[in-house]
């Protein structure tokens, strides 16, 4: 028998009351953890975009916006594929690689997937104009050398970037994002029916943590045929050289393609950053709310518990427990409550994040183990804070008053 | 001499006015005494016991137990003093409902430096003394009233106190159980040489002590 054991036995005795005491703090922690685990992947996605696509440029139809592009709606606007040739033939300096795409949301089996038509690299570089422009190759690196190692090689050896340089893709072949391959239970070499036509999975792409994980890539011309949108594309992604972009590549492109919207991925990412900022703000607000609501509700629970135990506490004081020991007991209990609240909150929040993440952020969310530490710190901190006043009042309980009645 | 009071006074502040509960009470108790305190209801018996233990503050006067100045001690010192020197036995048993008999007995040792096993053995020995070894894992609700009071007595003894303060320990028990408890206290007084102050209403119980103090309106007769 020691103080810890005593606290534990009392705790077990009243465990049914726990729910009411812990509700607020658990929910608060859950919300924070949920938001955080979503915003972490979302931030990572931003980082991935920034890292890998860096100064990339997106050419979209005039009527389109970035949301349409990602949402790949049925009626998202398109533009002629011929624009690719226009860019190539305009011989702009700093255009390093480009990739026209046609994206539409389709059903494969029971799954919703984003079907993306792409043009493999061999078909772009084989265009005579492109070859003449001589922009491919080593001479580019110097002007385009960003600082990090990934981009030192212009990114082409980076796994995540490989989709940008799909060397070749047959008309009956497709590439699968990692998430969708798991959902459809497909592996390299399997076949899959898309819009009534059979495709062979030539490769499952590595996980990128971006929207690409949910996509199926087929040949652009095949996509145009199947979707009945001949000679049209939804976007042209341009791998531009950063220096060239700051030197006005964007406005030169706008001259070449006056009836399009031309933005950098940086701008697209900015909206995502905005969302993340907002989510962080919401977390912060929640943090403040749980400190107040959670603290008060734990304090209230503790006070009710102490009141119920007045007689017992009075008896402990009578047999020689001093005030400090009573404080210690109350705060130890608060500590245990904090641990439980933190753990349950973390589990609930993570579950919610994993479950809602794909819906809200369009990204697969993984549990973040390090958040459990933060949850515990917050929960224990709030619980202790809320219990200070009740502990103080418990110390003031008269040692005898409650002993006389039976 | 183990306990000495000098002109002990206690006035309760009440919204209807001051209540004189103890009036210049002076007495001495020697080591090994079994003192019974009698008196009509409201005569100040409980007030006297609580004052002796420092559980309420005397208004004036002196209390010394083994040279410890109860009246002027700090709360912390008083707590330590109670834990080390005083065992309580109350009319209402005052056991913790979610602790088993042996856990209740060990309770005062919770803040002591004894090892876990030592605490257990001490408590077990005392449960043997009060003849409840076979009920050690029972909760208070699973014990009879007399058994509960014996657990309370074992608990009062676990710190090897100098003094046991008992407030109507048999008040809730039927006569034959009362005799058991009184005999137990007597045995503790004799064998363990522990000084006992026992408040009682019953003239019969009062005969178990070797000295009697009778209170009347807060004064010793
Ligand atoms: N907290 C209090 N506030 C005001 N008056 C009190 C308080 N406690 C006790 N009294 C009064 O002090 C007097 C002594 O009370 P005490 O409890 O010591 O009597 P007692 O001798 O133990 O009585 P009983 O035999 O009925 O237990 C009583 O008149 C009582 O009304
Ligand atoms: Mg009384």
Image (cartoon, helix red, strand yellow):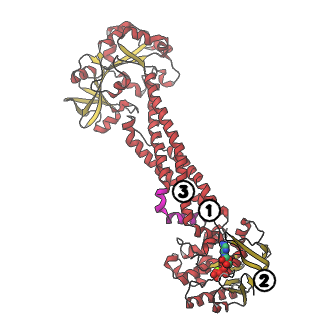
Label 1: state its secondary structure.
helix
Whether tag 2 and tag 3 are in contact, CB under 8 A, the answer is no
Q: Do labels 2 and 3 share a chain?
A: no
Spatial CA distance of label 2 from label 3 is 47 Å
Asked whether mark 3 and ligand 1 are closer than 8 Å, the reply comes as no
Classify 10 Å Cα crowding around label 1: few (below 14), some (14-19), many (20 and above). Answer: many
Question: Ligand 2 is found in which quarter of the picture?
Answer: bottom right
Corner quadrant of residue A353: top left
Residue where numbered disc 1 is placed: A394
Residue A292 appears in view? yes
Identified at 56% across, 85% down, the residue is B173
Chain to which the residue tagged by mark 1 belongs? A
Q: Is residue B206 above or below residue B160?
A: below
- Above or below, A4 against A257 in this view is below
Task: State the predominant SS element of the stretch in magenta.
Answer: helix
Q: Residue B27 carries which label?
A: 2
Residue A132 lies, with reference to residue A322, above or below; the image says above
Residue bounds of the magenta highlight: A3-20
Which chain's residue wears label 3? A
Q: Magenta stretch containing residue A12, yes or no?
A: yes
Q: Where is residue B218 drawn, in percent x and y?
A: 73, 81
Looking at the image, do the residues carrying marks 1 and 2 touch, with CB atoms under 8 Å apart? no
Dot 2, crowdedness within 10 Å: few (<14), some or many (≥20)? some
């Amino acid at each position: 028998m020691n103080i810890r054991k005593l606290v534990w036995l009392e705790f077990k005795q009243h465990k049914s009351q726990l729910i009411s005491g812990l509700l607020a703090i658990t929910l608060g922690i859950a919300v924070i953890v949920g938001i955080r685990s979503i915003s972490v992947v979302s931030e990572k996605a931003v980082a991935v975009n920034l890292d890998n696509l860096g100064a990339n440029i997106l050419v979209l139809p005039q009527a389109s916006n970035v949301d349409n592009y990602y949402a790949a709606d049925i009626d998202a606007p398109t533009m002629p594929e011929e624009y690719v040739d226009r860019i190539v033939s305009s011989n702009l300096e700093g255009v390093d690689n480009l990739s026209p795409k046609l994206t539409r949301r389709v059903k494969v089996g029971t799954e919703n997937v984003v079907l993306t038509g792409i043009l493999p690299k061999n078909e772009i570089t084989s265009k005579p104009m492109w070859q003449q422009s001589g922009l491919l190759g080593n001479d580019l690196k110097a002007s385009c050398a960003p600082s990090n190692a990934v981009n030192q090689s212009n990114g082409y050896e980076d796994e995540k970037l490989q989709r940008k340089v799909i060397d070749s893709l047959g008309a009956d072949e497709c590439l699968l994002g990692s998430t969708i391959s798991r959902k459809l239970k497909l592996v390299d070499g399997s076949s899959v029916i898309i819009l009534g036509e059979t495709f062979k999975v030539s490769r499952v792409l590595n996980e990128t943590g971006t929207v690409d994980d949910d996509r199926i890539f087929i040949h652009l011309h095949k996509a145009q045929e199947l979707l009945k949108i001949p000679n049209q594309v939804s976007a042209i992604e341009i791998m531009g050289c950063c220096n060239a972009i700051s030197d006005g590549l964007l406005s030169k492109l706008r001259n070449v393609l006056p009836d399009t919207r031309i933005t950098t991925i940086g701008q697209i990412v900015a909206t995502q950053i905005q969302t993340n900022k907002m989510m962080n703000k919401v977390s912060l607000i929640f943090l403040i709310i749980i400190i107040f609501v959670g603290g008060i509700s734990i304090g209230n629970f503790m006070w009710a518990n102490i009141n119920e135990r007045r007689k017992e506490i009075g008896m402990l004081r009578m047999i020689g427990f001093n005030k400090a020991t009573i404080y210690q007991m109350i705060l130890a209990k608060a500590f245990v409550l904090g641990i439980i609240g933190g753990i349950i909150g973390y589990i609930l929040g993570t579950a919610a994040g994993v479950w809602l993440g794909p819906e809200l952020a369009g990204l697969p969310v993984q549990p973040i183990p390090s958040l459990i530490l933060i949850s515990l710190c917050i929960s224990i901190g709030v619980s202790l804070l809320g219990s200070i006043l009740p502990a103080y009042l418990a110390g003031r309980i008269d040692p005898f008053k409650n002993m006389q009645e039976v | 001499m183990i306990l000495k009071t000098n002109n002990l006074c206690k006035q309760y502040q009440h919204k209807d006015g001051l209540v004189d509960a103890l009036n210049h009470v002076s007495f001495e108790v020697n080591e090994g005494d079994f003192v019974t305190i009698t008196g009509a209801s409201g005569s100040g018996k409980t007030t006297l016991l609580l004052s002796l233990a420092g559980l309420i503050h005397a208004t004036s006067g002196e209390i010394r137990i083994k040279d410890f100045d109860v009246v002027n001690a700090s709360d912390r010192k008083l707590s330590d003093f109670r834990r080390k020197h005083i065992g309580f036995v109350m009319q209402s048993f005052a056991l913790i409902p979610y602790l088993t008999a042996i856990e209740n007995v060990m309770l005062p040792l919770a803040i002591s430096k004894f090892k876990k096993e030592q605490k257990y053995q001490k408590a077990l020995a005392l449960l043997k003394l009060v003849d409840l070894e076979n009920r050690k894992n029972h909760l208070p609700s699973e014990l009879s009233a007399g058994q509960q009071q014996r657990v309370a007595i074992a608990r009062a003894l676990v710190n090897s106190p100098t003094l046991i303060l008992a407030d109507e320990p048999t008040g809730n028990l039927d006569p034959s159980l009362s005799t058991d408890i009184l005999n137990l206290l007597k045995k503790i007084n004799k064998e363990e040489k522990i000084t006992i102050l026992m408040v009682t209403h019953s003239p019969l119980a009062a005969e178990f002590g070797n000295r009697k103090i009778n209170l009347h309106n807060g004064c010793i007769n």
